[in-house]
Amino acid sequence: MKRWSRAVALALLLVLVGCSEGAKLVQESDSGGVVTYPFKGETGYLFSRFRAEALEMIEKRCKGAYRIVREGEAKGRSRVVDNPGGSEVIGERRWGLQFRCKE
């Protein structure tokens, strides 16, 4: 029975990791755009492991120099996760970075 429960726990972990979404370009224009990334309230948006990924996306999109015009909490999402103990609603907070590429 222990092997079965370990297998279920591992499968659940893989599903949860696969469902998480990192940095994402949600709006794009010729001169810039908006990138969002998830963060946890306890650790804050500056310490999210996805902030560096978001800044790399911006740098790649701008081919170098850019300026952050505005940043703040963006619309998050909620999802339902089914596990052996029942269903659970997980809320995800996202932080947004609006940027402009420098010429």
Image (cartoon, rainbow, N blue to C red):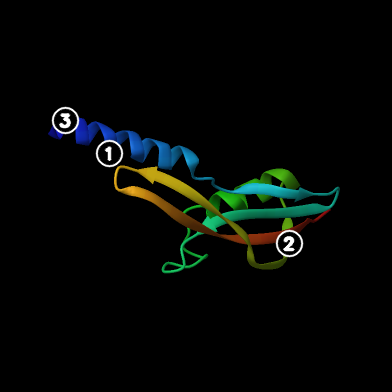
Residues at marks 1 and 3, CA–CA distance in whole angstroms: 10 Å
- Between marks 3 and 2, how big is the CA–CA gap? 52 Å
The answer to whether residue 63 is seen in the rendering is no
Whichever of callouts 3 and 2 sits on the residue coming sooner in the sequence is 3
Would you place residue 51 above or below residue 41 in this image? above
Crowding around mark 2 (Cα neighbors within 10 Å: few <14, some 14 to 19, many 20+) is some
- Residue on which the image places disc 3: 3
Q: Residues within 10 Å of mark 1 (few under 14, many from 20)?
A: some
Left or right, residue 83 beside residue 20 = left
Element class at badge 2: strand
Amino acid identity at mark 2: Arg
Checking the image for residue 67, the label placed there is 2
What residue is at 13 percent from the left and 34 percent from the top?
2
Q: Which mark is residue 9?
A: 1
- Badge 1 marks a residue whose secondary structure is helix
Using the image as rendered, state which of residue 87 and residue 30 is in the foreground: 87
Q: Give the CA distance from mark 2 to mark 1.
A: 43 Å
